[in-house]
Amino acid sequence: MRKWLRLLGVLLCSLTPLAAQDIDSSPSLKGRSVSTIADQISDASERAAFLDLFRQAPPADMLGRAKGFLIRFPQSAFLAQAYEVAARANFDLEKYESGLDDARKSLALLPENPLLLVAVADVEAREGLNQTAVEHAEEALDDLDRFAAPSSVKEHDWPDVKRRLKASAHFSKGRAWLQQALGLSAGEKRDQLLKTSEASLDRAQQLNSADSETSYLLGLARLMSGEPSRAASDFAMVYRRGGEIAPKARESLRAIYKLLYPRSDLPFETFVQQAQARWTSRAQTSSGDPAQPSRTTYKQSAYFGSASCRACHADIYKQWSQSGMSKMFRPYAAENVLGDFKNNNDFYLADEVEYRSDKLTITRSPQPALFARMVIRSDHHYFDILQSDHQWHTYPVDYTIGSKFQQAYATKLPNGEIHVFPIQYNLLEKQWVNFWKTIDGPGSERADPRSWEKLDSSTSYQALCAVCHTSQLRNVKGAGFDAKHLEFNEPGIDCEMCHGPSADHVLEATANEYHPKPPLTPPVNFHAIDHRKFVAICAQCHMQSAIRKPGPAGELNYSSAGDFFTTGIREPFVEFSRKGFYKDGRFRQTTFIVEALERSQCFKKGAVSCGTCHNPHAHDSASNPTSLKFRDNPDQMCTGCHTQFQDSARAAEHSHHSASSEGSRCVSCHMPRIMDALLFRARYHQMDDIPNADMTRRFGQDESPNACLLCHQSKDADWVQQQLSAWRSVAVSRK
């Protein structure tokens, strides 16, 4: 493995990973260290062994600790980290096959790990595993652009670390493509591989011009492409720097010198000097970063509000106004309140609440302590809360939040701050619940209802909820999530959050002057944009990991420059509370629904977007709360692309279930109901999810739910493995 990657591994393993971001709150660049990851480990011996993994030691010792952890705690929620430490130690010991095996096991649990992916791609390219090296390098580059720095890397170090990581990823791609080209005879395919290799190596050199190995390989690629003069420049720089590769570079220079000047009296050193000068000149004119395109800017006045859409789009406006998006946050109206404020309207502090495996369990305390009573007085709804002064304090309900599965309530203080009551009403369970306690990790302030009376950031609507429940949220002082200075254009999710600022369009329509525009220019034409942009617009609210960074005018959930929607960096998944994930690495909470979709090949290599399956303008939102396009024939969501399964016989042969049975539905196996939503199970959105008996055998059905066992509840993981093995045997025999 390359020397710099070894040094990076030392850096990463010497620092304990920090932060455990609560689920369903808005990450920001400030305050990312809520607690250490180790604090989530309740078993003292496991916690000590986990922390020991990151204490720097010789590679053999690091490997021994990692393997010991894996043996002692085979069902830990932190196996990805242990496998990563083992992989890096094996790489340092030059046990590449074992290292790659450990790395694959780590990436199976946490695929979005660019720091490990770069090291893996480097080793795979070294070992001649060219195709997988390219794939892992490209994944690493994608993740480096998507995610913020891991908390194990100091913020001021990250730009340089990220640059070097990108350089190494491009180097691995270039090396892999060059090796593929070396195995081919002259021809168009070989020429294309050499061109692609040269482009990657050139990018690696731009990012890290001091790396001699990159320059040497770039010289080889150019020499094979019939560019001896340019190759000589690369070899000359390597030769002048000295080091391990310098003698090989000198040999290459000698060969080129004889080729270009067979009878010349030009001294060899002069030839080298001229070649080096050309390299320096080229490096000075080469830009390290691609040119940025010009950016459209939008003023606050460009947003006219949803009412401006009504006149021309009356039917769509009506459908939107009846949708869950418009009802995400509404000023109080008695008819909109769905909770029980008359009968089952008491909440007791000492009651234990747990939601696990699709079941809500409330254990009543033998010594109940009444905390809140939800009541109606003079035709208005109120929360009466018994606070630490032993007095009842009354707060009016000024806003409702949500309308389909669960409803929360908020009150507005005289200073303008809006605070969300700690108790919510679940419509499916017909219960008042402390919802935060069911999803937050240990130590969560908002999960303790007694925190309410402080009326601070833990209960602030503006700071915690508004970014996904209101439209065009901004800090009028130009800062971040300071509850005292936040404003929004509209409650709920309005037309312009998805389609962009409407001013120009409204003015054109008023004047009957229509001008051609690109599909992404507001109002967005969702039928014409690519699937990644489509999902990015939905991700404004449906992506848990998005880090909210204020814009130049204080914008918090939209942008005034470039695309109107935010596409910022994300919190690394490893730094969230483990309550958001199953131990097998899959997402547990629906707040990660976009992240789950992005893991699927349907998204990565296909063109699947949210709009493939969902229609936000559906006519039947009351009876179709998830806005499915094909709720009566769900297979259409898949067979639109996988057309071979439109034939029911082919589908039954593939599913090994009767064509009319639930087991033959595509979503039953590939999108099982395993994501925790609002105290019910939603479908997993990594659409190519496949039942994995090994994971379920290791972690159990609670921590690695198997789609087969959701129906066949009397069976176990061994039975699943037998069935899957038998099906594979049948498939092989048919070939």
Image (tube, rainbow, N blue to C red):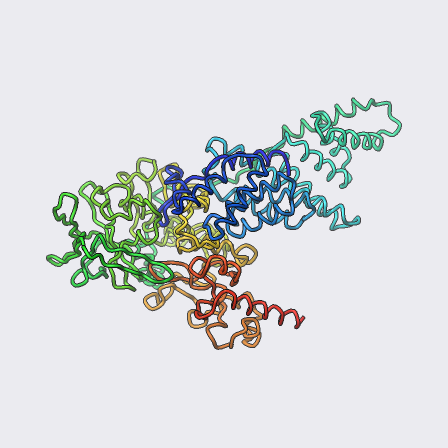
Given residues 533 and 178, the one toward you in this image is: 178
Given residues 716 and 507, the one toward you in this image is: 716
Q: Is residue 635 visible?
A: yes
* Location of residue 36 (image quadrant): top left
Count every numbered label the image shows and give the total: 0
Residue 74 screen position, x and y as percent: 49, 52
Vertical arrangement, residue 413 with respect to residue 340, above or below: above
Residue 387 screen position, x and y as percent: 16, 46
Q: Give the side of residue 419 with respect to residue 301, left or right.
A: left
Quadrant assignment for the N terminus: top right
Given residues 727 and 187, the one toward you in this image is: 727
Q: Give the side of residue 16 with respect to residue 431, left or right.
A: right
Residue lying at the far right in this picture: please name it: 263
* Location of residue 555 (image quadrant): top left
* Location of residue 642 (image quadrant): bottom right
Residue 463 screen position, x and y as percent: 31, 43
Q: Residue at x 67, y 42 (%)?
A: 174
